[in-house]
Image (tube, grey):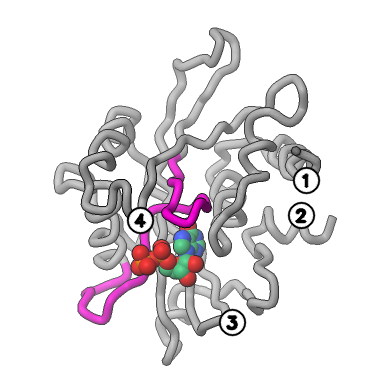
Amino acid sequence: MAELSEELAGGGKVEGSGLRTITREAALELRGYKHACHVMLHAPDPDSKLFGRIPLRHAVLMMMRFDGRLGFPGGFVDPEDVSLEDGLTRELTEEVGWGENLCPITEEDHLSCQVREHPQKMVTHFYAKQLTLEELSGIEVSATHAKEHGLEVMGMVRVPLFTMRDGSGGLPAFLSNHFIGNSRSQLLYGLRVLKLVREDKLWEATRASQGVR
Ligand SMILES: O=c1[nH]cnc2c1ncn2[C@@H]1O[C@H](COP(=O)(O)OP(=O)(O)O)[C@@H](O)[C@H]1O
């Protein structure tokens, strides 16, 4: 139970990593740490209904990585990048074909930040960017033409935010996949703070995901 609350609060759990939450400002003061930035792209989808009855409400993107794990688009910030957001945009260009037609990712989109000591000293910055459904669908298409398509990125996936009547299909089954780093807790945190899934539903789905086979 304690672990669940920790994950929903964005604390997460990565075995032996010594993960802790800090502010963006404190992260930028750190010396000798690598910074990685990842973003949850999402869009309101008020009209779509699965099987004509399950309202989807929002579209949220993650990606299938080269290593068979799910994660968010993004990556390590290089020393040449002017800012964290600049590094994130560069990674997004390579991974999903992020174009200049889209609003740039800014400091205001920064959602949370965690520092870890093992296996290497690094900070993971998590962003969330709201797009229109049309823009999000455009990203799904441009990702198939991006530099890393079929290489580091095997494909974009939408996260099912609903739970099926059987109690395990949908979000619980999705959460039982393998996730890279702390991306699973980033997902839960993003869904919770942006109110994309009701907190009680999120709690239930997280619990149910432990029993999915
Ligand atoms: O979605 C994510 N959330 C949090 N950490 C992630 C995510 N994806 C990858 N990471 C971690 O961030 C670091 C950078 O990995 P990534 O593969 O994204 O960057 P790269 O393309 O620059 O190599 C790695 O330590 C990886 O485990």
Residue at the disc numbered 4: 152
The reply to whether the residue tagged 4 has its Cβ within 8 angstroms of ligand 1 is yes
Residue 210 — which label? 1
Does residue 69 show up magenta in the picture? yes
| Mark 2–mark 4 distance (CA, rounded to whole Å) | 30 Å
Residue at the disc numbered 2: 4
Q: Secondary structure at mark 3?
A: loop
Residue at the disc numbered 3: 118
Q: Secondary structure at mark 4?
A: loop
State yes or no: discs 1 and 3 in contact (Cβ < 8 Å).
Answer: no
| Mark 3–mark 2 distance (CA, rounded to whole Å) | 22 Å
* Residue 184 appears in the picture as rendered: yes
| First in sequence: mark 1 vs mark 3 | 3
| First in sequence: mark 3 vs mark 2 | 2
The vertical placement of 49 against 58, above or below, is above
Q: Secondary structure at mark 1?
A: loop
Residue drawn at 77 percent across, 27 percent down: 167
Q: Quadrant of ligand 1?
A: bottom left
State yes or no: discs 2 and 4 in contact (Cβ < 8 Å).
Answer: no
| First in sequence: mark 4 vs mark 3 | 3
Q: Quadrant of residue 92?
A: bottom left
Residue drawn at 28 percent across, 42 percent down: 143
Residue drawn at 60 percent across, 52 percent down: 178
Residue 113 % position (x, y):
51, 68
Q: Amino acid type of disc 2?
A: Leu
Residue 144 % position (x, y):
27, 39
Provide the residue span drawn in magenta: 61-84
State yes or no: discs 1 and 4 in contact (Cβ < 8 Å).
Answer: no
| First in sequence: mark 1 vs mark 4 | 4
